[in-house]
Image: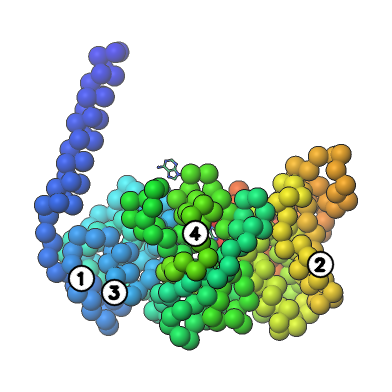
Amino acid sequence: MSQLIFSVLIISGIGALFALLLELADTFIANYGECHISINREKDLVVQGGNPLLFSLMEEGIYIPSACGGKGTCAYCKVKVLEGGGPILPTETPYLTEEEQAEDVRLSCQVKVRNDLVIELPAELFLIKEFKVKVDRIVDLTPSIKGVTLGILSPEEGISFKPGQYIQLEIPKYKLSKEPEYRAFSMSSSSKDAHSVELYIGLVEKGVVSTYVHEYLKEAEELTMRGPFGGFYYHDSDRDILLIATGTGLAPIMSILRHMRSEQIQRKTTLFFGTRTQENLYCVEELREMEKQLPAFTFIPTLSRETEDTQWEGKRGRVTDLIEDLISEGADYDVYICGNPDMVDSCTDRFLGKGIPEDQIYFDKFS
Ligand SMILES: Cc1cc2nc3c(=O)[nH]c(=O)nc-3n(C[C@H](O)[C@H](O)[C@H](O)COP(=O)(O)OP(=O)(O)OC[C@H]3O[C@@H](n4cnc5c(N)ncnc54)[C@H](O)[C@@H]3O)c2cc1C
Ligand code: FES
């Protein structure tokens, strides 16, 4: 038995070494020369081969959605590679359904440009731009969330986005990163303001970008951001609205609410905002003020770990359980959910269970 385990280990070791050598040879020796990328069989780009498709397109000013910075973990960077992409890699298969695989959908951060490619991109991706921004303000919203306001320096016309969408913020290389890194952050500001965006950035333990923002970022520093991205945004309809947020998931919800306030949209709207304790709550004053400015709006914070001996008179418990208790079966709502993936999944299941159709449930998972 031990001989068998030993043999398996030796074979796996040789396999891993071989793969590493191939990767090193690919990086340092292979020269793919110039490659053509045909987009929608209309536009032709000439790029230097050898880089992931995501970054080759980025260098040409075409920005594919991406939340993980090209690490192959967010699955936001899907594009159709009709010709030249080679076989689907093991790093891609967990993120692609059988249907997507049959339709030549690939993770663009995993497909290397080694030869000419034919790809298909939706027209709206051509509207995404790169911006130079300056940090105008950094504030502590809670012990672990900073509010960061970025003034747009260029292009002059600023950003046009739908309330709820996100940008990619790029930070320079520093102690925790070998190269500039970017991550997705939702805009919390009103889409009326094209020249300044506000972000709520939570500190993630050992997280590269969030640590930079919390420990190194200074006012007046200049950065790069790209956007707008994402299908999570406010949709017009006559239905009542339920907004569900935990932690920094409040960011896109604030953008939606600020849009509703500036447009005086009087749809019956309830926000359930879940945090652990009172010290993790933020934007409370503005949300209470909004209840006066938008009479059909109700704000319900709920705390999951507030101890019984404190002054808190509001709701206690997880936001998911609150929904179970307060939302009646068969009610018709547009629902917007934003926060950690587990919360989004369990809230979605509860709403589906209460008969709310899938196409009325919008969500963003902050993975
Ligand atoms: C659409 C969208 C919108 C978002 N909006 C927001 C927002 O408004 N506000 C917000 O705060 N966040 C938002 N996020 C999340 C954000 O994009 C980042 O994922 C988050 O800030 C963490 O990034 P980071 O670089 O700090 O962490 P990362 O460096 O990406 O690390 C993430 C986790 O992996 C661990 N890790 C990293 N490297 C290693 C390693 N080598 N080995 C083991 N573990 C490792 C880290 O410890 C950490 O726990 C959003 C995400 C999405 C998808
Ligand atoms: S960029 Fe995140 S999976 Fe490709």
Per the image, label 4 sits on a secondary structure element best described as loop
Q: CA distance from mark 1 to mark 4?
A: 33 Å
Alpha carbon distance from label 2 to label 4: 31 Å
Foreground label between 2 and 4: 4
Q: Earlier in the sequence, mark 1 or mark 2?
A: 1
At 33% from the left and 61% from the top, the residue drawn is 108
Mark 3 lies on a secondary structure that is: loop
3D distance between C-alphas at marks 3 and 4: 28 Å
Q: In the rendered structure, which amino acid carries the disc numbered 2?
A: Arg
Nearest the camera: 114 or 209?
A: 209
Tag 1: Cα neighbours inside 10 Å, few (<14), some, or many (≥20)?
Answer: some
Which residue is the site of mark 4? Answer: 217
Tag 3 residue: 60
Indicate the secondary structure of the residue bearing disc 1. Answer: strand
Q: Sequence order check: which comes first, mark 3 or mark 4? A: 3
How far is mark 1 from mark 3, CA to CA?
8 Å
Query: In the figure, 220 relative to 310: above or below?
Result: below
Task: Name which residue type carries label 3.
Answer: Glu
Which quadrant holds residue 222? bottom left
The answer to whether mark 3 and mark 4 are in CB contact below 8 A is: no
Q: Amino acid at mark 1?
A: Val
Tags 2 and 4 touching, CB below 8 Å: no
Where does label 1 land, which residue? Answer: 47
